[in-house]
Image (cartoon, rainbow, N blue to C red):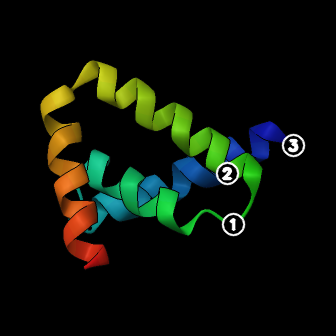
Amino acid sequence: MVNDTVSKVGIKLERLTRRDFSIAAALELMAQRARTVEEQVVIEVMREVYRDMNPEAAAHAQDFSRSRSA
């Protein structure tokens, strides 16, 4: 079941990055739209890993997220 969720999240992430979203911005958007607790957990883990790997891009994504919600 978790594997299915990881696959779905990965596919959504791939689609958003094809549409010129950065990975960090796509993860922020996906976090806002998560439908299940399982999706929320998978996305949050992905966000944490990405933030650890690339802190500058993660900061930019938070700015993006704030501008979209305003």
Report the side of 55 relative to 4 (left or right): left
**Amino acid type, residue under disc 1 in the picture:** Arg
Q: Of circles 3 and 1, which is in front?
A: 1
Q: Nearer the viewer, residue 56 or 5?
A: 56
* Callout 1 touching callout 2 (CB < 8 Å): yes
**Crowding near pointer 3: few (<14 within 10 Å), some, many (20+)?**
few
**Crowding near pointer 2: few (<14 within 10 Å), some, many (20+)?**
many
Task: Residue lying at the far right in this picture: please name it.
Answer: 1
Q: Nearer the viewer, residue 33 or 22?
A: 33
Residue with the mark numbered 3? 1
**Residue in the image at 35% along x and 57% along y:** 26
> Residue 21 location in percent, x, y?
24, 61
Q: Is residue 55 above or below residue 2?
A: above
Task: Residue lying at the far front in this picture: please name it.
Answer: 70
> Residue 27 location in percent, x, y?
40, 51
Q: Quadrant of the N terminus?
A: top right
| SS for callout 2 | helix
**Crowding near pointer 1: few (<14 within 10 Å), some, many (20+)?**
few
Residue with the mark numbered 1? 35
**Residue in the image at 24% along x and 65% along y:** 66
Whichever of callouts 3 and 1 sits on the residue coming sooner in the sequence is 3
Task: Give the alpha-carbon distance from disc 1 to disc 2, as whole Å.
Answer: 7 Å
**Amino acid type, residue under disc 2 in the picture:** Glu
Residue with the mark numbered 2? 39
Q: How many marks?
A: 3
> Residue 70 location in percent, x, y?
25, 79
Task: Give the alpha-carbon distance from disc 3 to disc 1, as whole Å.
Answer: 15 Å
